[in-house]
Image (tube, rainbow, N blue to C red):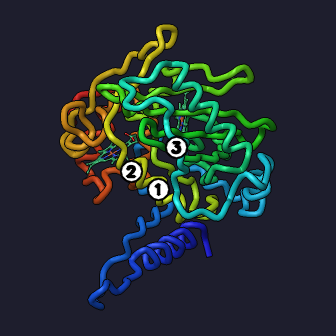
Amino acid sequence: MNLDKLLKTISALLLTSSLAVHADDEGKPTKSKEPKLLPPAVSLDTGLLLQPVLTLPDFTYEKFAAEMSTVGPEKIHKEWTSPVVALAKHPQTNPKGLTHDEVKAYMTEVKQMFDEGKANPVSDVGLISTQEDVIRQPMLNHVAAFSNDVVRAYLLVQRTASDHGWSYYSIVQDLTAEPKIHYFAELKKDGPELQATSCYKCHSSGPLAIHPARGDLVLDAKLLAAVDKHIAEQPRSEFYFPPDNPKPPTGKELTMKFCARCHNDDDGDRAALFQLQSHAIRVMVDFGYMPPNRHLKPEEVAELKAFLEHKPKP
Ligand code: HEC
Ligand code: HEC
């Protein structure tokens, strides 16, 4: 069986299992409340990608599982009940905007919880960071979500297949600030360092839903679906740019209705997208994840392509 066929078979299986029906209290069949599993990544050949699709044929599940466990097998692929791990209650009642020290303390805490095996990470080979202009080799990610009344926090533990050490990144969303704020940081040896310029290129709306490069390169597809649902439903919030890490030039705003009705700064579910985000846009649309409920028509793809290439509308 060739890879395309295999992916389509896996996709069909995943779809059938996510449509499993249950009976409600009165015996009427209801759709399962569990989040739908993500359909596997299959390129639609839209012509939006700048480089050939990477399917990583030599990267077997066994190799993937072994590489992922180098972070410490006891920290990953765990039994879980809630996809989002509860953080201790914030010491202060009703804070109005957290200080940078408080934000950094949450970042340090989520790394510590991961190190102690108290997180529920989803482990995958990321689609967006593996394809195209980034590295073109498996990007290994462990992503864990946490929350309490005042923050939503995330930890990313990451390395490329050819590196040895793991790097740590965190996002903390301050729910008490008005408007709410997303803080981004790399967690270095001596603590979190707030960053933003390079992160904004992909993370325009804050945390990104997890998309594995291949359906089999993920530990716990159910956990992934649940974490993705949590990320998709996050409240809108502003990006924090530290003074030494300003907002980069964005290029033009994407205003085409078929994207901007959800991605806009006024009443969108997600923040506006710009030419700067072209990498994530190319991958999400080519692999059929955006828009969420249909595929673009050829003339819409042409319009999007012209926009990304800084050309006038065809
Ligand atoms: C090339 C695009 C890209 C850039 C640049 C980038 N990220 Fe990400 N990041 C991703 C993707 C894609 C995911 C989702 C992981 C997956 O699909 O496996 C992610 C996930 C994360 C997560 C886990 C929570 C979530 O959003 O899913 C954190 C934390 C994170 N990134 C922090 C950062 C920080 C901090 C920076 C800047 C220093 C940064 N990222 C830069 C693409 C990027
Ligand atoms: C019906 C609403 C809707 C439409 C229409 C839509 N999106 Fe999205 N988009 C979302 C949601 C919700 C997310 C976050 C969850 C996810 O990534 O699955 C998202 C995520 C994204 C991301 C990742 C960055 C982010 O904001 O999280 C990109 C890039 C993206 N969409 C591009 C597009 C493009 C390009 C189009 C038009 C071709 C489009 N979207 C149309 C709702 C939409």
The tag earlier along the polypeptide, 2 or 3, is 2
Q: Which mark is residue 128?
A: 3
Q: Is residue 255 above or below residue 77?
A: above
Determine the image quadrant of residue 3.
bottom right
Question: Residue 198 at what x, y percent from top left?
Answer: 52, 23
Q: Report whether 42 appears left or right of 192.
A: left
The C terminus lies in quadrant = top left
Q: Amino acid at mark 3?
A: Ile
Q: Is residue 126 left or right of residue 226?
A: right
Q: Amino acid at mark 1?
A: Ser
Circle 1 SS class: loop
Mark 2 falls on what kind of element? loop
- Depicted 233 relative to depicted 186: above or below: below
Residue 46, label in figure: 2
Assess mark 3: CB under 8 A from ligand 1? yes
Spatial distance from mark 1 to mark 2, Cα to Cα? 8 Å
